[in-house]
Amino acid sequence: MNHLSLIIKREYLTKVKNKSFIIMTFLSPIIMIALIAVVAYLAQLNNDKERTISILDESGLISSAFENTENTTYIILKELSLENAKNLVKEKEEYGLLHIPMGVDIDQVAKSIKFYSEDTPSLTIISSLENRLEKKLTDLKLQQGGVDIEKIKASKTSIDIAQESYEGEKTSKIDNIVKLAFGGVAGYLLFMFIIIYGNMIMRSVIEEKTSRIIEVIISSVKPMQLMMGKIIGTSLAGITQFVIWLILGGVLMMVVSSIFGINLSEMQTPQQEMMQQAMESQDMQMQAQQLMTAIYNLPLTNMIIAFVLFFIGGYLLYSSLYAAIGAAVDNETDTQQFMMPILVPLILAVYVGVFTVIEDPHGTVSTVFSFIPLTSPVVMLMRIPFGVPLWQQLLSLGLLIGTFRITVWFAAKIYRVGILMYGKKPSYREIYKWLKY
């Protein structure tokens, strides 16, 4: 394979010197960061919006339940009729009016509460008001029934079942979340890389085939060498582009945050007030400690090595199929009939990983799909954080490599015939005949 290095170099340089490749390499992270910055800025404006809510409590039961927050101010109205209160709030252009009418009992009061506003109120605000009212009215109802609220609060018991293996390794519920997150990110990256750069390989083959330059190249290079050179060269170009995206994206993120003063974390908290209430009711320090323990317990070395091996193996396997499809057709429109057999295993792998691995990572379904070469790169990467025996990883990797070699052999036979076929839309039956040549 003395020409392989030359083909790889040619493919790599052709890709990275292409104007559209250069433009998208630098323009894509700029567009992405700009969109993130705009969304973060708008979210920050929304969170910084100050709201004033007036409360007309004719029952005299609930007004004490409302305390001002950073962005919401509550004003208690007294000795006003409902119409006067609505007019007053409307004149002051406040956010809205919460009316709590007089009632015979607490149940009647609860059914008659209304919120008046000029525009449709925020779902977050309404949910926050409902939570406050429900808690206050429930406590009042219990007190009327002669129940000591403090005793009820003191009697509540929080259960957090400790988890430990027979060997003494301690885990927690958050471990599963962390493991699924790491496995999910690895599987998703592989999925996207195959889709994006597999299509790039396919388009590259189609372009050379339609321009007839392939006839000159094939006269001095074996089809197997040409196909492998395209796969490896395009892969290296893709990795280069991906690294540039990471570096440029990180730099732009810091520049946007520092120059424009945009707090990018704000876009994650559109329900800031509700989240704050939820956090106050939990021991966040304990959860942070459990999170660090979960990350520490991850088999990071195993995950990194497995990620590299399964990533390369999975990508090469699917890339050979994309190259074969590109050689079999004359344009991208004709590729649609052949794409489904490639996309179905990928999509199935993601669904199995998300819906099965988290529930039972060592079950029959998860284990079987982690051995099937077309799904193992994604499913096995999701299983490994949960602790997979080394022999299973080696067996899965061996099956993947073996299938890749067989697939490359079949793809090369299709490639050898297909790159010289023009003007005819191939069928599955015709492609099967090419394998016999």
Image: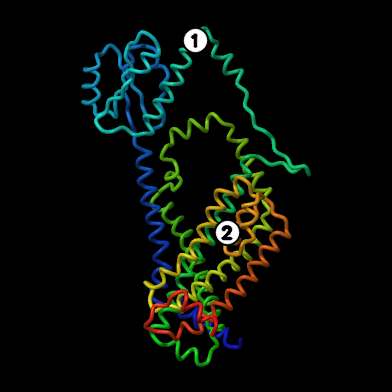
Indicate which disc residue 223 carries: none
Q: Quadrant of residue 20?
A: bottom left
Instruction: Name the residue: 66% across, 40% down.
Output: 172
Judge by depth and name the residue closer to the eye, 33 or 383.
383
Instruction: Name the residue: 55% across, 82% down.
Output: 436
Which residue is under mark 2? 378
Q: Quadrant of residue 405?
A: bottom right
Amino acid on which the number 2 mark rests in the picture: Val
**Residue 225 location (% of width, % of height):** 56, 84
Mark 2 crowdedness (10 Å alpha carbons): few <14, some 14-19, many ≥20: many
Q: From this view, report whether residue 13 is shown above or below residue 166.
A: below
**Residue 89 location (% of width, % of height):** 25, 24
Q: Is residue 311 left or right of residue 65?
A: right
Quarter of the image where the C terminus is located? bottom right
Quarter of the image where the N terminus is located? bottom right
As drawn, which residue projects farthest toward the right? Answer: 167
Q: From this view, report whether residue 217 is shown above or below residue 353.
A: below
